[in-house]
Amino acid sequence: MRPIEGIRRDTYKNIKETRTYTVNHVPPNRAQEAHQTSAKYEVSEFDRLGFTPEYRNAFSAPYVRESDIKFGLEYVETVHIKANDTRMIIGTIKHLYIPNDIITTEGYLDISNSSIGSLGLHSYYKLDHLASYPYAKTK
């Protein structure tokens, strides 16, 4: 999380108050809406941007129904990184939802169609599988 002092941080406030949060992999066709969730709204981003809140297993934080991969986390601590005055939020995974059709026969996740990557504040990328290599050993 970027420097926090003096800036409205609704997500961080919610995490601290409820002690729960979710991380949802957004599909490529929803990248623009996902980006807009960082804007400041007076209403829920779910309502404003057309995402559907989904509650599972009595977990208090909502998941994003449109996402295939979903993590439900319980807040553990915030680590202040002095070098650039940012915060790293640490949580324990309590729930993990992954559809069977993205699990490969080797047990890996093929996230190329269900996830996007982000770099910086506003750049998004499709994720494509490049290669799989055996465990590296000294020759």
Image (cartoon, rainbow, N blue to C red):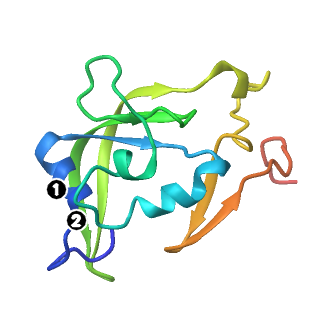
Counting from the top left corner in percent of width and height, residue 71 is at 43, 35
Whether pointer 2 and pointer 1 mark residues with C-beta atoms closer than 8 Å, the reply is yes
Q: Residues within 10 Å of mark 2 (few under 14, many from 20)?
A: some
Measured in 3D between alpha carbons, the distance from the residue under mark 2 to the one under mark 1, in whole angstroms, is: 6 Å
Residue 60 visible at all: yes
Image point 35% across, 45% down: which residue? 47
**In this rendering, would 71 be left or right of 131?**
left
Q: Residues within 10 Å of mark 1 (few under 14, many from 20)?
A: few
Residue type pointed to by label 1? Lys
Identify whether 103 is placed above or below 36: above
Mark 2, secondary structure of its residue = loop
Position above or below: 25 against 45: above
Residue under the point 79% across and 21% down: 105
Query: Is residue 127 found left or right of 6 in the rendered image?
Result: right
Judged left or right of residue 19, residue 128 is: right
Which residue is label 1 attached to? 13
> What residue is shown with label 2?
9
